Image (cartoon, rainbow, N blue to C red):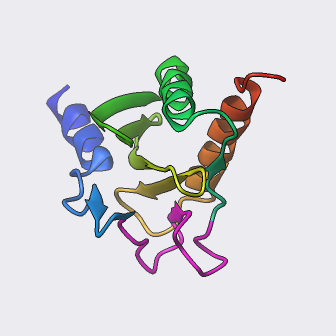
Amino acid sequence: MSILSTVLAACAGERPNNLGTQNGRLAPCPGSPNCVSSYAEDKKHHITPLAFSDAPHSAFKRLKLVLEQRNDTTIITESPGYLRVEFHTTLFVDDGEFLLDQQQPVIHVHSASRIGYSDLGKNRNRMEDIRREFELTAAKP
């Protein structure tokens, strides 16, 4: 059983030390294709931020509820306008971040695999799933 535990721990990888805000932005993606970010300018990594039309604090609260309802997501860090989460799959752990931009109004997103080179689109697909869930929970006029 300890061999299985060791293998699973290796697949989870270590938490990166570059998470959080840096100069009011989320960390950039590495060159590998296993990351998406709304701050990225290149097509390979760019993903559209989450847009909202309700009050910023309401939108962020709504996002948190969406994340809490997901079976694959654990909120690790929460501060005003910022969430850091871990996304769990069968063998792997990915890191996600959400940063409220009240001026735009959008919530910037960043999601990256801890290990490996390619994620076969998993981070992008997951963020698009979160976008759909976030949009479905928006108050209808």
Total labels drawn: 0
Which residue is nearer to you in this view: 99 or 45? 99
Q: Where is residue 136 in the image (x, y as percent from the top left)?
A: 76, 27
In front: 128, or 51? 51
- Above or below, 104 against 44 in this view is above
Question: Residue at coordinates 82% horizontally, 22% vertically from top-left?
Answer: 140
Quadrant of the drawing holding the N terminus: top left
Residue 25 relative to residue 60: left or right: left
Magenta stretch bounds: 26-46
Where residue 88 appears, as percent x and y from the top left, is: 43, 35
Q: Residue at x 63, y 48 (%)?
A: 50
Which residue in the rendered view is the most extreme toward the left?
2
Q: Which residue is drawn at 52% across and 66% down?
A: 118
The image shows residue 57 at horizontal and vertical percentages of 48, 32
* Residue 106 image position (x, y, % from top left): 59, 51
Please name the predominant secondary structure of the magenta segment in the image: loop
> Which residue is depicted at the point 54% across and 63% down?
36
Would residue 55 be found to the left or right of residue 60 on screen? right
- Whether residue 95 is situated above or below residue 65 in the rendered picture: below
Q: In which quarter of the image is residue 85?
A: top left
Indicate whether residue 32 is drawn in magenta.
yes
Residue 59 counted in the magenta span: no
